[in-house]
Image (spheres, rainbow, N blue to C red):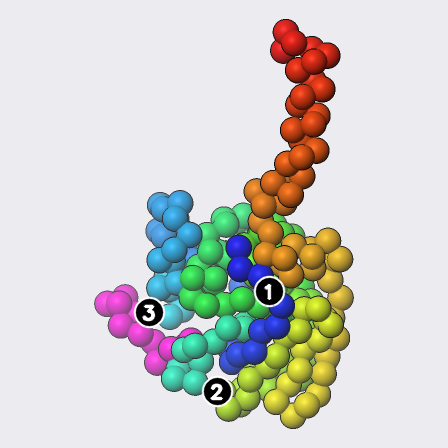
Amino acid sequence: MDKFTTLTGVAAPMPIINIDTDMIIPKQYLKTIKRTGLGTALFAEMRYNEDGSEKADFVLNKPAYRESKIVIAGDNFGCGSSREHAPWALLDFGIRCVISTSFADIFYNNCFKNGILPIVVTPQQLDLLLDDADRGSNATLTVDLENQTISGPDGGTITFDIDPGRKHILLEGLDDIAMTLKRDDSIAGYEGKMAENRPWV
């Protein structure tokens, strides 16, 4: 998993509440267990017409936001079913950070497991960030995980809270398997003792 330290990029404004996982990636794209190739399906029903052509008014189809790395969204982002394809699709598109006033718990946890930083801000802070994002590609945001800050194009800075353990996971680029392997010596030692004390197991 790629480390998350500092991210500078265009932020796509999506001031919609209750963006659920089916909106993030509709059910027809869940047949695969591969984490790649899902970026084209991100927000598919909002992004494409029935004939497959792009909807010109959808934010990620606008020239200024096609390379967005950050999404700024309304309350309760990632609600609905627990599909892990949702963060996979965001990541495959290039989104490394989602900012909202609140997240659904399962989606929030899945973000950390896949290298995406979900940031919770106040409604007032969200309004400021949405105003920055509305300026398009000329106004990038910088997210500094180490210092827990979001810097806007005018020099304004917002601070955010994050669990220290989850912060460490992103800074080091550790998924669940990598976290387990960091304790390989302890695991091997425990298994060795078990083999000595309970050879019949």
Q: Earlier in the sequence, mark 3 or mark 1?
A: 1
- Name the disc covering residue 43, or none: none
Q: Which residues are magenta?
A: 49-61
In this picture, is 154 found above or below 47?
below
Left or right side of 146 for 116: left
Q: Residue type at mark 1: give it.
A: Phe
In this picture, is 8 found above or below 114?
below
Q: Which residue is mark 2?
A: 137
For marks 2 and 3, give the one nearer the viewer: 2
Q: Residue type at mark 3: give it.
A: Tyr
Can you give x and y, in whole percent of width and height, for residue 152 in the image? 64, 85
Q: Earlier in the sequence, mark 2 or mark 3?
A: 3
Can you give x and y, in whole percent of width and height, for residue 95 in the image? 50, 68
The foreground one among 93 and 104 is 93
- Name the disc covering residue 4, or none: 1
Q: Earlier in the sequence, mark 2 or mark 1?
A: 1
For residue 61, what is the image quadrant? bottom left
Mark 1 surroundings within 10 Å by alpha-carbon count, few (fewer than 14), some (14 through 19), many (20 or more): many
The answer to whether one can see residue 122 in this image is no
Residue ID at (62%, 68%)? 5
Distance (Cα) linking label 2 and label 3? 22 Å
